[in-house]
Image (cartoon, grey):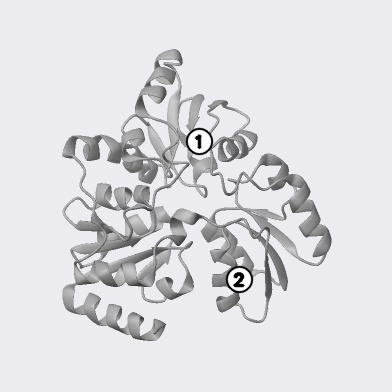
């Protein structure tokens, strides 16, 4: 059944000129039929260059919005309309504007995991892999970092020459892992390297052998000479690495490291999208898109 669905999707996307993008947290059966898989920013950049005029984003809403911001002339479809992101949706525009009024000499640095609305009031956008580099590069010494306090703390610790105001937001999946849980897994797997995403708490990050983005974790694990790894990010990455490196062993940091919003998208959802009977087309007011894309263009300018 799975192979039949995959073949039908592959046939239809070729016939109808549809590009399928799959975030790395998608399950393997969806990544297999995607034109490209990776992190949200890399996929948004890739969407700009593909010849297809219709793009299906298998991910969550802010990712589809980012694709639309960078490719306004293309039809962008979110594979499952219910797929949101608790971190991206934690703060409203008014709260950030209030912070800007209180701290007028601070630049607002927004993690890419934010809504289009929040990006309209940000000065520059960052990814987990580029956040340290960009915060070092921007001219402002004072920074309001939104919305992830854990990623913000990681950046603050690596950019001590600047001043940071952090807001108390974050990924409920990554931040839910405790130091005690991480220590227990490390003790149970003493030969495994611990690779962790900076959305985890500082106490968990401190235990890691490598800290990096989803793409960084996958790259490190594939290139490393080590044979065993504990993966401190969404458990889909464990699955993907098992397929890519069957001679190595990969262990989840926790069975709770599952993003329910990512997992809501199914292969039949993708089929409905390429058939034109499912998903949700992302529509942004041009005033919002133009204001929001500015911080992404600044990220590109700084080499993000």
Label count reads: 2
Q: Find residue 123 and report its horizontal and vertical position in percent.
A: 37, 31
Closer-to-camera residue (295/173): 173
x 54%, y 71%: residue: 240
Q: In the image, 261: left or right of 224?
A: left
**Mark 1 Cα shell of 10 Å, populated few (<14), some (14-19), many (≥20):** many
Q: Secondary structure at mark 1?
A: helix
Q: In the image, 169: left or right of 195?
A: left
**Mark 2 Cα shell of 10 Å, populated few (<14), some (14-19), many (≥20):** some
Label number found at residue 135: 1
Q: Find residue 56 and report its horizontal and vertical position in percent.
A: 28, 63
Query: Do tag 1 and tag 2 residues touch (Cβ < 8 Å)?
Result: no
Foreground: disc 1 or disc 2: 2
Q: Which residue is mark 2?
A: 222
Closer-to-camera residue (142/153): 153
x 61%, y 77%: residue: 245
Q: Find residue 280 and report its horizontal and vertical position in percent.
A: 25, 55
- Residue 145, compared with residue 94, is above or below; it is below
Q: CA distance from mark 1 to mark 2?
A: 28 Å
Q: Secondary structure at mark 2?
A: helix
Q: Find residue 110 and report its horizontal and vertical position in percent.
A: 43, 36
- Quarter of the image where the N terminus is located: bottom left
- Residue 114, compared with residue 145, is above or below; it is below
x 54%, y 44%: residue: 171
Rendered image quadrant of residue 226: bottom right
- Residue 258, compared with residue 251, is above or below; it is above
x 20%, y 63%: residue: 54
Rendered image quadrant of residue 19: bottom left
Q: In the image, 75: left or right of 171?
A: left
Q: Of the two numbered discs 1 and 2 on the same chain, state the one appearing first in sequence.
A: 1
Closer-to-camera residue (175/135): 175
């Amino acid at each position: 059944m799975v192979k039949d669905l995959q073949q039908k999707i592959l046939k239809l996307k070729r016939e109808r000129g549809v590009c399928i993008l799959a975030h790395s947290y998608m399950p393997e059966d969806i990544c297999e039929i995607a034109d490209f898989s990776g992190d949200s920013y890399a996929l948004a950049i890739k969407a700009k260059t593909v010849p297809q005029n219709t793009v299906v984003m298998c991910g969550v809403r802010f990712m589809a919005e980012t694709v639309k911001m960078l490719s306004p002339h293309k039809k962008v479809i979110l594979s499952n309309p219910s797929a949101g992101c608790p971190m991206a949706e934690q703060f409203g525009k008014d709260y950030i504007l209030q912070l800007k009024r209180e701290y007028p000499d601070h630049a607002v640095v927004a993690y890419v995991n934010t809504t289009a609305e929040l990006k309209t009031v940000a000065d520059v956008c960052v990814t987990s892999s580029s956040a340290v580099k960009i915060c070092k590069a921007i001219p402002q010494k004072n920074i309001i970092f939104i919305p992830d306090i854990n990623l913000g703390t990681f950046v603050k610790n690596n950019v001590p020459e600047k001043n940071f105001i952090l807001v108390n937001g974050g990924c409920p999946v990554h931040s839910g892992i405790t130091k005690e849980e991480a220590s227990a897994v490390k003790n149970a797997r003493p030969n495994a390297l611990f690779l962790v995403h900076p959305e985890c708490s500082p106490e968990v990050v401190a235990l890691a052998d490598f800290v990096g983005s989803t793409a960084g974790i996958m790259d490190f694990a594939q290139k490393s000479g080590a044979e065993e790894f504990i993966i401190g990010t969404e458990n889909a990455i464990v699955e993907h690495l098992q397929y890519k490196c069957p001679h190595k062993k990969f262990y989840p940091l926790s069975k709770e490291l599952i993003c329910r919003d990512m997992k809501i998208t199914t292969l039949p959802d993708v089929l409905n999208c390429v058939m034109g009977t499912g998903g949700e087309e992302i529509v942004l007011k041009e005033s919002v898109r133009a204001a929001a894309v500015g911080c992404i263009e600044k990220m590109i300018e700084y080499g993000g």
